[in-house]
Image: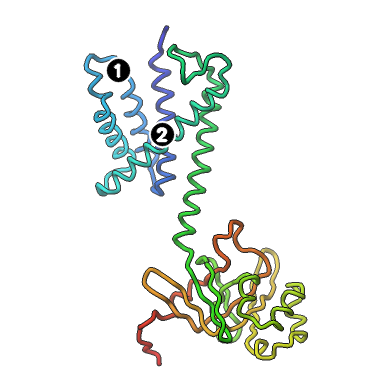
Amino acid sequence: MVVYGDIIVAVNIVMNAIILWLTALAAGITGKAWRIAAASIIGAAYVLISVFEYSIIFYHPVGKGLVSVVIVIIAYGYSSIRMLFFQVGVFYLISFILGGAIWGWLYFLQQNSPVLLSTVSVAVQWSYLFTGIFLGVGLVVLLVRRCLSRMYRKQTVYPVTIEYAGKTVATAAMLDTGNGLYTIVGRKPVMLVELAVINAVLSPMAEEFLTGCQAENWLGNLHECKDIEWLGRVEVVPYRAVGNKSMLLAFRPGSLSIKTDSGILTVDHVAVAIYSGTLSNDGTYHALLHPDLFKSGKYEGEANLCA
């Protein structure tokens, strides 16, 4: 069998570049194109070491590990030993996922003896190989984006407790850095809460009004609500959607408590806007927090210098 070294090197350069790019994506780091290209070439050259007499040293697990470290340093630079180990770990994880996806695709297409159990060489069509690479990359990108999205949500989702009229309701709220909603009077920052959640602290009269009326008609039909005390706390929040302007119905709660890593943050200067739909498709959170809430609140036990 004739082995063309230039083809092997070319394929390995492409594969290495894909793996290093996916590693940068998964690790959340910025990889420069020329560094990734250089690391890919070094990794491809490693394949040709097998023609030398003492190549077994380089193919020992320790040798492979050292080569991987060198490739990662070339691709992303060195900042700390902890970061280096993290990058190498992600590099291997991506390599295993991508390699397994490609082999799984080839096994799926094999019509004779199973590829993974065969002890003889198997000819693989280029179209099959590139299709496997394409599917493998798509799988890795999908998993990485999904995992990063969930990780980001976990980092920005906070347990909150809303108090009103002596009743409280606890839920999960996501910090919405794009939330720029303020009330017209007092310019209070606005958090958005699902109707199904906020109903727990409202009176039966307010709940009956909100559930029995279409959300777009809430403001126009406020006179039909019989909860006079709650109506005294109602505020209007202007907002701009794509192509139009509208208004949200909000009210002033008694207080809002946000559980953070630094402790319990209590906010009094806030308005709760009511949303009739669902904010999160997977139920991760049921409210959106305004960024200014973390500035205007105070932690438990913290002295209020403005008092």
**Label 1: few (<14), some (14–19) or many (≥20) C-alpha neighbours in 10 Å:** few
Decide if residue 158 is in sight here. Answer: yes
| Protein image colouring | rainbow
Q: Position of residue 155 (x, y in %)?
A: 44, 60
Q: Residue at x 38, y 88 (%)?
A: 304
Q: Quadrant of the C terminus?
A: bottom left
Q: In the rendered structure, which disc, 1 or 2, sits on the residue that comes first in sequence?
A: 1
Residue 224 appears left or right of 102: right
Residue 86, placed above or below residue 40: below
- Location of residue 187 with respect to 77 vertically, above or below: below
Q: Which mark is residue 50?
A: 1
Image x and y of residue 9, in percent: 39, 22
In which quadrant of the rendered image does the N terminus lie? top left
- Label 2 CA crowd tier, 10 Å (few <14, some 14–19, many 20+): many
The percent position of residue 245, horizontal first and vertical second, equals 69, 71
Q: Which residue shows up at 50% across the image and 66% down it?
A: 175
Report x, y in % for residue 87: 34, 43
Total number of numbered labels? 2
Question: Which residue is the site of mark 2?
Answer: 95
The amino acid marked with disc number 1 is Ser
**Which residue shows up at 67% across the image and 63% down it?**
242
- Give the quadrant of residue 197: bottom right
Which amino acid lies under the numbered mark 2 shown in the image of this protein?
Ser
Of residues 291 and 162, the one nearer the viewer is 162
Does residue 177 show up? no
Residue sitting at 65 percent across and 90 percent down?
A: 229
In the image, residue 206 above or below residue 85: below
**Circle 1 — which element?**
helix
Nearer to the camera, 168 or 16: 168
Q: Which disc number belongs to residue 228? A: none
